[in-house]
Image (cartoon, grey):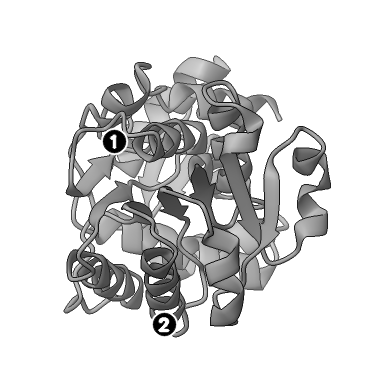
Amino acid sequence: MYALTGASGQLGRLVLKHLLTQVPANQIIATTRDPQKLADIAAQGVRVRRADFSDPASLSAAFAGATSLLIISTDVIGQRVAGHQAAIAAAIAAGVSHIVYTSAPGADPNASHPLLAEHGQSEVALATSGVKWTALRNSIYAENLKDFAGALLVNGQLLIPEGSAKHSWVTREDCARAAAGALLGKLAISGPVDVTGPEALSFADVAPRLSSVSGQTITAQVLPNDEIIAQIVAKGVPAESAGFIVGFTSWIAQAAPTTPTDTVEQASGTKPSPVDVVLRSAVTA
C-alpha cells in the first residue's frame, strides 16, 4: 500500500487526486493530524488514519501495511527535523521499504538558512536510515508569483528587489504529479532530485510575461526593500504582509539559482506547466 503524511494540506490533497487515478482507493493510506479533514477522501474508500509527528506513538499504527511512504515536510522551523526523524523511524518499524520526502533545492545540513539546513538534516536522516529513499527538492512554487504580482504591481510597474537569480518556478500541481509518481515507483532515482518547472526566470523576466498575459505594458523596477515596502503599503497591502513579501522576494532574488530538470515528466509522463498559467490568473483575478 501507498501512504502519505500531511494528506489534508494543499499539496497532500493534490497528491491524493493523482494517486486515485492510478491505484485503487483501498491501496492508499492518507494520514493527517485531524482525520475529520479527510472525511470526503475516506468516503471514496481511502484508508484515513491519524498521524502526528509530535506524537510518535501515532505513527507506527498510521503507517502499518504501507510499503511506500511519502513524507510531506512540515513547516515549523525548529521542530521539523525531530518530527521527520520520528516518521522515518516509525516507517522503518512498520516495514516501509521506500520513503519519498519533499525537500528543497540547496538542502544542506550546514546551510546558513534554517529552511535549507533542516531539509538537509532530514535528508541525512534518510540517507543513513538503510531504506531506499528519494528526496524531491521542489523548486519555488509558481503560485507564489501570483501573490507577489498582486502585491508588487504598482501603476504598471513590478517593484522588485535587488538580485538577478533565475529560478525554475514549478506549480504545486506538478509537484503533486511528481510526488505521486515517485511514491508509485515511477521515478528511477534514489537520493535527492530537483523538481522544477520548464524554464528559469528572474523577477525581471517575470515583468514581460505579465505584459504578455495581461495585454498591458508592465515593466520591472528595481528598488531598495524599504522603498518597495513603502509603496505597496501605500496602495493598501498591510505592513506586516508587505514586510514578509519583500523579505521573501529579496531572499529568492539573491538565492542560488535553480536549473530546469525533466523530473516531473519522468515521474508523471506529463511536461511541467509554464509560469504563464499562474501569471494569467494573477492578472485576471
How many marks the image carries: the answer is 2
Q: According to the image, label 1 marks what residue?
A: 201
Q: Is residue 166 visible?
A: no
User: Considering only order in the chain, which callout, 2 or 1, is on the residue closer to the N terminus?
Assistant: 2
Q: Quadrant of residue 189?
A: top left
Residue 7, how many percent across, how many down?
Answer: 62, 51
Query: In the figure, 113 relative to 268: above or below?
Result: below
Amino acid identity at mark 1: Leu
Residue 113 vs residue 20, the one in the foreground: 20
* Residue 216 position (above or below residue 60): above
Name above or below for residue 150 compared with residue 267.
Answer: below
Q: Is residue 104 left or right of residue 172?
A: left
**How far from the left and from the top, in percent, is residue 271?**
34, 18
Residue nearest the viewer, comparing 233 with 126: 126
Residue in the image at 45% along x and 35% along y: 180
277 versus 1 height, above or below: above
Task: Give me the residue at 33% from left, 46% from top.
Answer: 139
Q: Residue at x 42, y 22 (%)?
A: 273
The image quarter containing residue 194 is: top left
Displayed quadrant of residue 206: top left
Q: Secondary structure at mark 1?
A: loop
Q: Residue 196's x, y, as percent? A: 30, 36
Mark 1 crowd level (few <14, some 14–19, many ≥20, 10 Å Cα) = many
- Residue at disc 2, secondary structure: helix
Give the residue at mark 2: 82
Q: Amino acid at mark 2?
A: Ala
C-alpha gap between disc 1 and disc 2: 34 Å
Which of the two residues, 265 or 215, is positioned nearer the viewer here?
Answer: 265
